[in-house]
Every structure is written in C-alpha cells, then in structure tokens.
Image: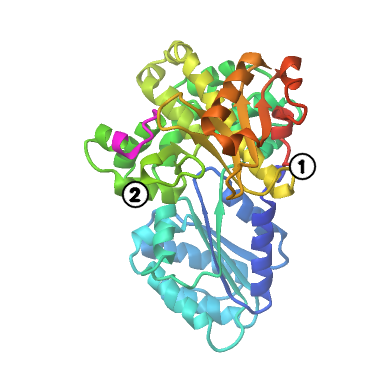
Amino acid sequence: MTNFIGRIEERLQLQQSIAKAIEGDPQLVVLFGRRRVGKTFLLRRVLDEISVPAIYFAALRGRPNEEAGRFAAEAARVLATEISGDWIQIFRSLIEVARTQPVVVAIDEAPYLIDEDDSWTSSLQHAWDEAQRNGPCNLWFCLTGSAITTLTHVISSGGPLFGRTTKQLRLNPFDLPMCHELLGAESTPRTSIEALAACGGYPLLLRQWNPLVSAQDNIFELAGKPLGPLASDANALLLDLPDPTGYRRVLSSIGRRRSKRNEINSELGQRADRALNVLEQTGLIQRVQPIDDKSPKALTYRLDDHYLSFWFLLVDPNQQEIDSGQGDSALRRRLEVWNHHVESVFEHEARQHAMRLVGTGGLPTGVVGRWWTDRPKQGELDVVISDAQPMWSVVGEAKFKDRFGITDWRKFMSNLETAGPRARESQRAIWSRGSIDESVLSLDSKLLVFGPQDMVSSGQ
C-alpha cells in the first residue's frame, strides 16, 4: 500500500464528518481539487479506515439512466438491499436505509453527472431536504471532482445545493515538505526544490522524478518526449476548464510573464476579466500585489501552479519539436529559462516557508508577501512580514545560488534603502541554496539564515 503523506487536516475533517453522520447528523460534503492532486487517494483511504461499508462510485460520462443503473447496482451490493429506479428513487431509498443504519456514499467525478443531467443536482437537493426532516438520518454524502467551476456553481448562491453543504474542503497540490517526503531519502533538499519546480505538487508526476540524476536529465526524459508525463499532463489539467482553448490563452500569457491586466488584454485582443475571475476560482492563478499596496494599479497575476508555469515556459513553446522527437535539443536551448524558473520557484517557496514559520511561532505574526516598486529593477524584496504597523517585522532575500556573497548583500541593502524606513530597522533574513559568506555574516549578528534543509521541514 502506498504511504500516506500529509493531508492531516483534510483527513481528520473527513473522519469527523463521517463520525457525525454515523451518530445521526446527516452530512453533505464537497471535496474540491485539481486533477492529479490526490482527491481519490485521500477519499479511498478514509473510506477504507471506517467501520461501516461505504459506497464509492466513480462517475463516467454515460447517459443519465446508465449511470443511475450502475450506481444503484453498487449501492444494492454494499447495503445488501434493493436499490433501483431513477436518481430520485435511488436517493429516497438511500435515505430510507439511513434512517436505520449508517449509509456512507462518495461520488467521484460528480461533475460528469451534473453536466450530463440537468436535473441531477435538483434531485439531490430535494432528497437532502427530506433527509433533514423526520428525525435522525445516518447519511454521509460526498461529492468530489476536478471541475471546480461546476462544483462551485451548484453550491454558490442560486445553485441547487446553496446553503446545504455541511463541509467544503479544497485539496491543494503537495507543498515542498510533502514533496520532499514523497521523493524519499534519496532526494536532497535541493533536488526536491527542483522536482517541485518541474512537477508542481502533483504526486503522480513527482513519483516519476528520479532524485539520483540531474534536474536536466529528468526534464529531458519526462518532458522531452512526446508521451512524457511533463509534456502531456498539462493538457489533461486544462480540460477541466469551462473553455479550455480560451482560458489556455490567458494562462499562456500569464505563464510568459504578462502579469498585468492590460498586458493580458492587449495580447488577447479583448478583455479577459471573466476568464481571470474563473481562473482565480480554480486556483490556477493568483492576484499578487506589493505588500501594503492594494491599489488597482499595483495588481498583477501569477500562475499559482509550478508545473503549469514550467509547462508554459519550456514545453508549450517547443511542443512541435517534442512531438517530432527533437525534444532534447529544443529543451537544451532553453536551460537558461529553466534556471530562471527555478529561481522564481525558490523565491516563492521561501515565502511559503516563512508562512509556515509564522504559523508555528518561528517568525513574528503577520502577513507574508513581497514588495517591489512600479519601475522594474528599481527595488524588490522577496520576503516581507507585515503586522499592519508602519514598520515591517521581517524583510528577506532569496537566492538560488551556491554562495550568497557580499555583492548580493549590497544589492539587498540597496533595496532596503529604496523601501524606506519601514524596512531599514526590520529583522533581516536570507534564504539561500548555498552557503553565506563570512563577510556577510559579520555585518549583521542577528541575521536569520535559512537553507533548503530548513525549507523542506514542516516549519518547525
């Protein structure tokens, strides 16, 4: 059996929800998550651990009556009772049984049912309202799927399940500590950072990364061939968008560092407001602004997915060469792009590490972000912790290089000067892939120094 990594809080919440249902308090749960993040693995593991039989049903894109028949057959097998008819009759039968015994139901890829049958969620709504009446009901019902916009629509205001869910959980890709744990003892912290930069936090991709060879060799093997997982999996992830072609153009623009709304609109030749809102909802992109500056002018967008960022930068521009068997040579020409990408991921993971430290008390309480000036290269700070006071509590620099030297320090100090008084008296910190020059350490006796080993820890 595959080791269970992370997901402690999500696993606990699912277990507690099932326990409530078994005690007579019916539960309607929605588990969101992008394709490949491990929703099914988590759900199946939780169901395997409970003391009552569970109905697990993986929906297909079949006809409504065929799907109803498949589900009824599985429910009848698990509950050892007659279950038949259309979805309305099936739901009523489940509630009848749940009046006398626990009934645990998980429907995976529920958006398939929702998309193929306009009445499916309405049938569930009426059945769920009935389950709330006439005494205890030992029913646990979970919907999960990767079409986040579809699930969000049915539980949002105006949707048939609005106000009815008892738990909504979002499963995100693995973070860096979880990636390092998955890669195992053969992986160094640096290797885990590089694997995360290419594979994102997707367990199925990470399991194919070989920590015993270089990042470049992994990329040539996994992304440089037509059917390589790093070359092809992005297309599967994008299929869950309402309009894969149109939204892909927005993602591609952001992936190629068109970060401002007007830049994106200009490249598309039209306003991208709706697409940007939907992509934010799915978690594929994130609004980013300099910390303490919430003005619309400062708003930028970034891909909130390391794998898609890697794919749009390195794979998508070279797809023709990869498909024709020339992927190795095409990707070799873009190794400098890969290096810049890893540097960007390292900066992001430094902020994630700072957030974990704030959560565990290792750094002062506050909001973690970054700061930059409007004009490029005039001033930038990779990590800032702000507690809403005029002074920032921590300011930091992140460098993915073998040695952080005196030149790097002077650049850091110049940026502090540009940021003004709020930064100059703050606690200073450095996140570095390699060592720190003694000449740098001698300039600040209170300097905080973090390396890859610290970053792959849980934040202790």
The structure residue drawn at horizontal position 74% and vertical position 43%, both measured from the top left corner, is 362
26 and 367: which is toward the camera = 367
The structure residue drawn at horizontal position 57% and vertical position 20%, both measured from the top left corner, is 411
235 w.r.t. 131: above or below = above
60 w.r.t. 325: above or below = below
Mark 2 residue crowding within 10 angstroms, few (<14) / some (14–19) / many (20+): some
Q: Amino acid at mark 1?
A: Gln
420 w.r.t. 407: above or below = below
* Residue under pointer 1: 460
* Span colored in magenta: 256-263
Mark 1 residue crowding within 10 angstroms, few (<14) / some (14–19) / many (20+): few
- Magenta span contains residue 260: yes
Q: Quadrant of the N terminus?
A: top right
Tell me the element at label 2.
loop
- Magenta span contains residue 411: no
Name the residue furthest bottom. Answer: 134
Residue 374: x percent and y percent? 41, 32
- The colour mode here is rainbow
* Residue under pointer 2: 242
- Place residue 169 in its image quadrant: bottom right
